[in-house]
Image (spheres, rainbow, N blue to C red):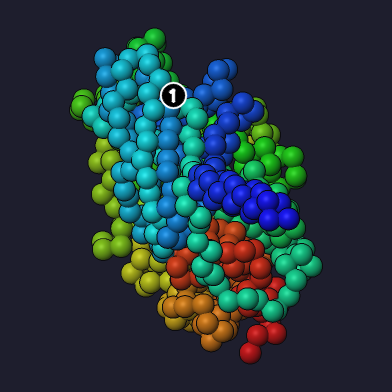
Amino acid sequence: MTKKILALLMILALLCGCVSVLADEPVTVYASDFSKDNDDWYGRGAQCYRTVDATLKTIGRQSAWNSPGRDFDLIEGGKYELSVEVKQDELDSANFMISIAHSTGGMETYENLAFGAAPKGEWTTLRGTYTAGAFERNVLYVETTGADTLEFEIRNFTVTAPEPLPEPKPTEPPMEIGDADNIPSLKEIYAGKFDFGSAAPQMVFNNPKWMNLIKEQFNILTPENEMKPDAVLDVNGSINLVKETGDETAVAVHFSAAKSLLNFAKNNGIKVHGHVLIWHSQTPEAFFHEGYNVKNPLVTREVMLGRMENYIKGVFEYLDENYPGVVVSWDVLNEAIDDGTNWLRKSNWLKIIGEDYPNRAYEYARKYAPEGTLLYYNDYNTAIAGKLNGIVKLLNSLIPEGNIDGYGFQMHHGASFPSIQMIRTAVDRIAGLNIRLRVSELDVTVDNNTETSFKKQARYYADVMKILIDHSDQFEAVQVWGLCDSMSWRGSQFPLLFDGRGNPKPAFWAVADPYSVK
């Protein structure tokens, strides 16, 4: 009997030892597999695509940070180990880093987590560690140092947790207002008045939860970054075209970053609003220089006009061929009015072409846009009197030429400013120009996620919607800028209709029935 007990105790001790060993084994949080697709990786200022060898290749780089990147859900306080294999075939040796871009409230900061030198033609492994901080968004990416235009490949990106991860901290209080799976549809509520939609980042189109939310609530989408010039202009392709043809106005485009959204929209009968063709920001600097080389002088007015025209032509031709009828409208020009002077901001467009560059942009857009495509000017701070004057001045210079259809209000507001009367004044004034209108980027921030703040936010949303309904004969669409608070560029201020888990907030119910809010 004693021997049996001793044997049993020994077995139990061995089992406990095994459990202890197993408990200490690192847990795989993520492991890359490019066997089928990009696995939610996307180009940050460059073009990324999956190769036939199931690697991810990055080309078209102009800066060291241009890189393959991916959003990761990392738990605050969690300790992570990172690794990736990199390969390049151009330099004898190149320095690489795994880095992270983390953001709170739209403010992005960076850390470098792993370092290594990759000899030419050899797969090299980078390894590093990271303890996650209190951030709303975490993007891991692979960049270079001292080799801004280097093309390279990655494979086997892994994230493991050597220790048990802490419990995620809640960011919103539990919602008791409604069932997220059984709520009214905003697109149906406003059918007959205007389209209702959202901005959506590339990462949501491999997640059934967010895709279902889009299909239930929205009938128009805007890509957050994937159709801006730095995602569409193919710098390397343009360089090659210039070399082949000798034509400095030659332009190449690609839409690899936007394909997830475009395919989703096409397959589900959802409209797309294009954002943006001409902008002073998020446009490769090389676009403005001879030979697409930033070390060369700026091009002449004539060459820049040619590049502008060929870029706009290339965008419309690609979309019309591959996604006919999907992109129904465009922000042709974005944020051209300076907040200080209340007239055209000092940009490369103004410096090279002159004050008629907006007119030429709309001329080319009208020339190449498919019939029925609506062309907008888009800007922020419309409710501020000086800025409003500048916007109206610009619109009045464009309207007589017949190439612009409407104005897009960026309503990135707070629940206390601007006042509802300021918004009404701005909407009334621009509506008086007898053009089409849209709210292109709507969100309303609050100080915290308390019941009091959410009620204040709901009242503000309701009051804004009442203004838009009063002008529904001119409004083409209303779009919130993001699906949920955790995806918003202002996420720490809880600005959207759905919380980070996709549950409807009081703001949602206010938008659904603004006249019920007291």
Q: Position of residue 181 (x, y in %)?
A: 76, 64
> Is 223 positioned to the left or the right of 446 in the image?
right
Q: Position of residue 249 (x, y in %)?
A: 37, 23
Tag 1, which secondary structure? strand
The answer to whether any part of residue 54 appears in the image is yes
Q: Residue furthest bottom?
A: 518
Q: In front: 153, or 265?
A: 153
The residue at 39%/9% (across/down) is: 244
The residue at 53%/86% (across/down) is: 452
- Local packing at callout 1 (Cα closer than 10 Å; few below 14, some 14-19, many 20+) is many
Quarter of the N terminus within the rendering: bottom right
Q: In front: 100, or 424?
A: 100
Above/below status of 321 relative to 31: above
> Is 316 positioned to the left or the right of 196 in the image?
left
Q: Position of residue 406 (x, y in %)?
A: 54, 55
Q: How many marks?
A: 1
Inspect the image, locate mark 1, and give the three-letter code of the amino acid beneath it: Glu
Q: Residue furthest right?
A: 182
The answer to whether any part of residue 329 appears in the image is no
Q: In front: 44, or 99?
A: 99
Q: In front: 160, or 405?
A: 160
> Is 387 positioned to the left or the right of 316 in the image?
left
Quarter of the C terminus within the rendering: bottom right
The residue at 45%/68% (across/down) is: 492
Q: Residue furthest top?
A: 244
The residue at 32%/25% (across/down) is: 149
Instruction: List the residue tagged with mark 1.
Output: 153
Place residue 361 in its image quadrant: top left
Q: Position of residue 294 (x, y in %)?
A: 25, 29
